[in-house]
Amino acid sequence: MTEGLAVSITEPDQLLDEPTSVWRLALQRFLHRKLGVVGLFVVLTIALVALFAPVIAPYDPLQPLNRTEDVQRRDPPSSEHIMGLDSNARDEFSRIVYGARVSLPLGFTTVLLAILVGAGIGAISGYFGGWVDNVLMRLMDVILGFPALILAIAIVFILGPGIRNTLLAIAIVTLPQYARVMRSSVLSIREIDYVSASEALGASPWRILRTRVLPNALTPLVVLGTLGIANAILEAAALSFLGLGAQPPTPEWGAMLAQERALIFTFPHLVIFPGLAIMITVLGFNLLGDGLRDALDPSLNE
Amino acid sequence: MIGYVLRRVLTAVPVLFGVLVAVFLLPRLTPGEPCSAILGERATPAACEQLYEVNGLDQPIHVQLTTYIGNILTGDFGDSIKFNRPVTEILLERLPVTVELGVTALFMAVAVGIPLGILAARFHNTGIDLGTMAFANIGVSMPIFWLGLILAYFFAIVLQGTPFALPPSGRFSAGMSPAPFYGVWGLTLAETGFVRTTADFISRLGVFNAVISAQWDSAVDAIKHLILPAVALSTIPMAVIARMTRSSLLDVLGRDYVRTARAKGAIGGRVIRHHALRNALLPVVTVIGLQLGALLGGAVLTETIFGLAGIGTALFDAISTRDFPIIQSFTVVIATTYVIVNLVVDLSYGFLDPRVRLR
């Protein structure tokens, strides 16, 4: 008990001493969450790997090496090829490195698309209310009525396999969550006096959305979006694993796994490494998302 | 209470209707003539016309929709194009495999996830908490198809020859599949009809069938085959349940009434058991319901890896061979189950927490 009292007495003084903004406080809280910082570190590392893939990768990810070098297909890891060679005698490590160039942009773009469309739907729904709201939200409920992966499989099936359609499918199945967040932000903000004041002063709906609603909705959207990237990468890998996403010879982690999965009992390195790459990337985004949520939402602080 | 139940049930109706329409539109949105999609590229115009007539595809679209919904409501799912058999038959064959796998996985997820979450909350900010949450974080980040393959490699190859070795695929070893329980019990059932259908369904729940008919060798064999896929499928729900239990319990442990209980001398585990747990588990119930979606999606992946002939693999095969009747009816069944389970979860929430009903 005494401990709690002591903290509550000293803290306000400290706050008065130095000027602090909401964002700086959030940043301070974020840096205190070790796991969130670890997540940020992992994500930045993978982003750098993707950016500098040609420098980091020792070999061409698409070039078979058994014609130019003294190597065999599916050679196990060695000092020369730290993750071994795949079934086409390509350097597995180089392919994993280049895989970051597929998965990261895919995750980002998917979530960006889902947020843009989802938040748009949510904003329209919340602002206009009535039957517009009803129709749009029931539509979102129908999307949520399907297990996500199964709906994504069905959509890719309609559109045809490939990375672009995978991206679209995952964006579609995930947009209801962003729509819901945006809608509830709009609904809660409409009741607040300063918004009524803006309205009375003749601010357009677009202006109110931009200056009043968005800043409030941004926090949950960013947190959901970060966790959404993790999810999108995982689902894209699953679709590729089922042969619906990235197609060979694209060095995509899920597709690499799918291609070599029959070899798990004989050449396990071809399955272990792509999976590890997926797991580490997804883990990074999950930890970062959790850290951001704790930092940006003070009400969650214990 | 009745009003609350009715209101909730009514909100599920438009969703289910939307699901039906979406599934109806699915093959009609696919590029190209449905005929060449169904009969292949080299179908003659005459064959196409006949196909359209038989399936009512020459009717106006709203007539097709009404017929389609009418058929589904009466349980008529049509015939599979590839297997040339009623879809319902195939569904009844495949469903028990997925039900057995899913129920086992969900049971494991709850049985391990909740205690882990309680442990983490009880020893908040200690090594136990950190370890449990690290496990949970890794669990939700792992591609389950990869985990499945790694488990198969580890238990079938690395542990080969030890008593811990487990089979990496299938449901039974050769010659070990158990006889249907009604045969063992000496019952003679009619070839068709409801009783026979139900009995066949139950007899395809491998472990359950073997246990109730005391075929112990088969039961052990079936359990050994079930462990790896169930563990792979349970990882994500287990991790999510553990996280939810922990955060919900921590939230409740910070409430005034728990502080009162502590002040009155209730310590450690007793506070959790007698005061906090019941309230903390409410949000966990919702999460368990939502995990069904992850389980059904994961079933496609798990069944593919472990070579199980469940609805996941059936659906996926149907998608790659464009077997529309199977795709449509399986999707309808899966989505309906999902919507109904979430409805039940919502209702149980209102039942467990009287405050919810007032809204």
Image: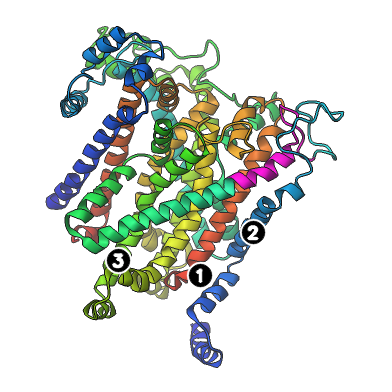
Give the amino acid at mark 1.
Answer: Ala
Q: Mark 2 — residue? A: A44
Q: Mark 1 — residue? A: A295
Give the residue at x 39% y 58%. Answer: B277
- Residue B134 visible in this rendered orientation of the protein: no
Circle 2 Cα neighbour tier, 10 Å, few/some/many (<14 / 14–19 / ≥20): few
In whole angstroms, how far apart are the C-alphas of marks 2 and 3?
Answer: 33 Å
Q: Earlier in the sequence, mark 1 or mark 3?
A: 3
In whole angstroms, how far apart are the C-alphas of marks 1 and 2?
Answer: 19 Å
Work out whether residue B32 or residue A221 is closer to the camera in this orientation and state it.
Answer: B32
In the figure, is residue B236 to the left or right of B342? right
In the figure, is residue A118 to the left or right of A46? left
Q: The C terminus of chain B appears in which quarter of the rendering?
A: bottom left
Q: Earlier in the sequence, mark 1 or mark 2?
A: 2
Residue A232: image location, x then y, percent: 49, 47
Name of the residue lying farthest toward the left? B3
Q: Label 2: chain?
A: A
Name the quadrant containing residue B165: top right
Name of the residue lying farthest toward the front? B45
Q: Which of marks 1 and 2 is in front?
A: 2
Q: Look at the image and say whether residue A290 sits in the magenta stretch.
A: no
Give the residue at x 42% y 66%. Answer: A218
Q: Is mark 3 on a helix, strand or loop?
A: helix
The disc at residue A186 is 3
Above or below: residue B207 compared with residue B196: below
Above or below: residue A276 compared with residue B72: below
Work out whether residue A69 or residue A16 is closer to the camera in this orientation and state it.
Answer: A69
Residue B54: image location, x then y, percent: 22, 12
Give the residue at x 60% y 59%. Answer: A39
User: Where are the magenta residues, as a range?
Assistant: A82-102
Circle 3 Cα neighbour tier, 10 Å, few/some/many (<14 / 14–19 / ≥20): many
